[in-house]
Image: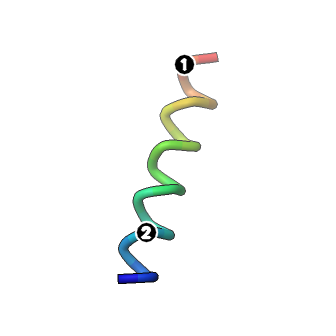
Amino acid sequence: MLVIAGVFYTFVIQRFESKV
């Protein structure tokens, strides 16, 4: 579960950086 949360968090950060 922790790993999934980390991957999901990283995905969100990547999308956020790409959007900016």
Q: Amino acid at mark 2?
A: Ala
Q: Which mark is residue 9?
A: none
Q: Nearer the viewer, mark 1 or mark 2?
A: 2
Residue 19's place in the image compared with 7, above or below, is above
Q: Which residue is mark 2?
A: 5
Element under disc 2: helix
Sort mark 2 into few (<14), some (14-19) or many (20+) by Cα contacts within 10 Å: few
First reached walking from the N terminus: tag 1 or tag 2:
2
Q: Amino acid at mark 1?
A: Lys
Residue 6's place in the image compared with 9, above or below, is below
Q: Is residue 3 left or right of residue 10?
A: left
Q: Which residue is mark 1?
A: 19
Q: Residue at x 53, y 56 (%)?
A: 10
Q: CA distance from mark 1 to mark 2?
A: 21 Å
Q: Residue furthest front?
A: 1
Q: Image quadrant for the N terminus?
A: bottom left
Q: Image quadrant for the C terminus?
A: top right
Whole-percent x, y for residue 5 in the image: 43, 69
Q: Is residue 17 left or right of residue 5?
A: right
Residue 13's place in the image compared with 15, above or below, is below
In the foreground, 7 or 18: 7
Residue 12's place in the image compared with 10, above or below, is above
Whole-percent x, y for residue 4 in the image: 36, 73
Element under disc 1: helix
The image's colour scheme reads rainbow
Q: Residue at x 49, y 34 (%)?
A: 15
Sort mark 1 into few (<14), some (14-19) or many (20+) by Cα contacts within 10 Å: few
Please state the total of marks drawn on the protein image.
2
Q: Residue at x 58, y 43 (%)?
A: 13
In the foreground, 3 or 18: 3
Whole-percent x, y for residue 19 in the image: 54, 19
Q: Is residue 2 left or right of residue 10?
A: left
